[in-house]
């Protein structure tokens, strides 16, 4: 009895997927819960596991096919799987002995003629006898033009020997490969994945639909770096996770979002929706593109819980194991371009959210502190926001609150 393999539920608002890769081929044995095929949606890549043990009997949807929820992918039949087919023994004909190459013609001094690389290629492609070609180059070298003339059946006169009274024609310099290479040899065309197409669509949608604007500020990271250095070893020993900067940024943003709810809101038709919960998206770069997993109810998490959650989501993103639940429902996003060396950027909104904070590289710069010039570790912050719901005053105030919390981390603990 055959067991059908069908496309499972893909998540909220996702009805279609693309068959990315079959992990088994017809005739292969499969175990219960063993991954059979990878499906790619516009948000995640997921595996479909076997619901029964047996043999992959057939494949109904080939790689690259678009399939809807509930569509038939293939079937599993009874059996233990066919062994790998052994190659059929064939009587091998004795290898033909290579034909003896004709003796090359001798040039001055009794040496064989030397073919230039471009000429040697033409000689090999046309099975020409290099010894029968009169080289017009220096010392009797066979040039590209000599080989081309021989290939076309013509003859190119050899250069006269010095002292013979004849004029020696010096061949013009030619590139080994004349003419531009075809574009197809210098390009690679790859079909866009569903994830990449969705990223492109959503980013363009954000630009088209939102009145997007970016405001900047900078933060002195001296106090935060000192606090982290002071407690990072004991923090890791107690909680089993490293103390990074992201937990401080998440907590600082929550302080600012509570004071300025418009930055945590969104536009739904003719309504403004203000959210009194804080699901913070953290942008993660993966080989397949940028994804934004969500830290749920981040205001109720400790610093250690925020760090653990971000670390777990990052690993799942890089391994392609994120679920739809991990990616939906964020209220505000933080994007850290500083890990790639970015000094300043204008991040694009993650619809339908109305705000996104861009973190950047920490760089030592001379700053005026108390009437003196000091070298301080500084970071530029950028807040991109939807001007339809967030006024300039609110955007600037938000960044100022984040700056204050990071420059004086005790404010976060006191919720100030």
Image: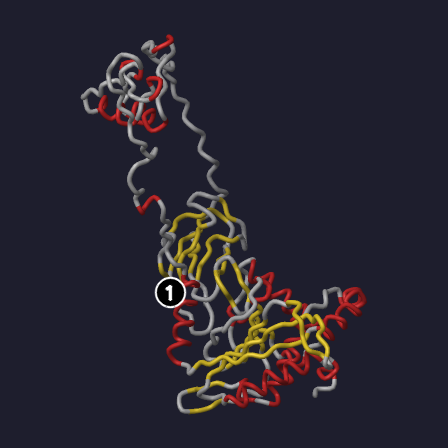
The image's colouring method is: secondary structure
The residue that label 1 is drawn on is: 68
Nearer to us in this view, 221 or 306: 221
Q: How many marks?
A: 1
Location of residue 344 (image quadrant):
bottom right
Q: x, y (%) of residue 49?
A: 50, 56
With respect to residue 247, does 386 lie above or below? below
Q: x, y (%) of residue 223?
A: 74, 75
Q: x, y (%) of residue 131?
A: 31, 14
Name the image quarter holding the C terminus: bottom right
Nearer to us in this view, 332 or 374: 374
Q: Residue at x 54, y 86 (%)?
A: 395
> Helix, strand or loop at disc 1?
strand
Q: Residue at x 26, y 17 (%)?
A: 158
Q: x, y (%) of residue 305?
A: 69, 72
Q: Is residue 73 left or right of residue 167?
A: right
How dense is the environment of label 1, judged by Cα within 10 Å: few (below 14), some, or many (20 and up)? some
Q: Is residue 380 left or right of residue 36?
A: right
Q: Is residue 213 left or right of residue 124?
A: right
Location of residue 25 (image quadrant):
top left
Q: Is residue 257 left or right of residue 98?
A: right
């Amino acid at each position: 009895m055959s067991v059908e393999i069908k496309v499972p539920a893909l998540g909220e608002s996702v009805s279609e997927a693309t068959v990315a890769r079959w992990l088994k081929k017809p005739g292969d044995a499969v175990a219960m819960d063993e991954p059979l095929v990878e499906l790619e949606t516009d948000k995640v890549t997921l595996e479909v596991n076997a619901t029964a043990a047996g043999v992959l009997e057939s494949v109904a949807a080939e790689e690259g096919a678009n399939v809807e929820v509930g569509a038939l992918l293939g079937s599993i039949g009874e059996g233990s799987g066919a062994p790998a087919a052994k190659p059929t023994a064939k009587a091998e004909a004795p290898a033909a002995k290579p034909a003896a190459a004709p003796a090359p013609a001798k040039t001055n001094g009794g040496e064989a003629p030397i073919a230039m690389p471009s000429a040697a290629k033409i000689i090999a492609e046309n099975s020409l006898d290099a010894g029968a070609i009169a080289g017009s180059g220096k010392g009797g070298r066979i040039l590209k033009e000599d080989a081309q003339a021989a290939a076309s059946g013509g003859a190119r006169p050899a250069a006269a020997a010095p002292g013979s009274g004849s004029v020696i024609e010096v061949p013009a310099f030619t590139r080994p490969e004349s003419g531009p290479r075809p574009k197809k040899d210098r390009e690679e065309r790859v079909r866009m994945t569903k994830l990449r197409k969705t990223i492109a669509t959503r980013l363009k949608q954000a630009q088209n639909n939102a009145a997007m604007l970016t405001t900047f500020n900078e933060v002195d990271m001296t106090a935060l770096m000192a606090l982290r250095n002071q407690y990072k070893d004991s923090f890791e020993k107690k909680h089993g996770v490293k103390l990074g900067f992201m937990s401080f940024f998440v907590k600082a943003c929550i302080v600012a979002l509570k004071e300025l709810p418009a930055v945590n809101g969104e536009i739904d038709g003719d309504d403004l929706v203000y959210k009194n919960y804080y699901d913070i998206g953290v942008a993660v770069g993966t080989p397949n593109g940028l994804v934004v997993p969500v830290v749920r109810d981040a205001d109720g998490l400790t610093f250690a819980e925020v760090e653990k959650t971000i670390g777990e989501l990052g690993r799942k993103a890089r391994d392609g194991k994120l679920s739809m639940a991990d990616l939906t429902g964020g209220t505000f996003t933080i994007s850290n371009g500083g890990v790639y060396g970015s000094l300043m950027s204008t991040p694009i909104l993650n619809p339908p959210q109305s705000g996104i904070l861009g973190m950047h590289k920490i760089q030592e710069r001379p700053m005026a502190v108390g009437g003196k010039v000091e070298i301080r570790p500084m970071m530029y912050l950028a807040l991109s926001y939807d001007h339809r719901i967030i006024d300039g005053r609110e955007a600037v105030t938000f960044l100022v609150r984040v700056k204050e919390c990071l420059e004086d981390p005790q404010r976060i603990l006191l919720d100030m």
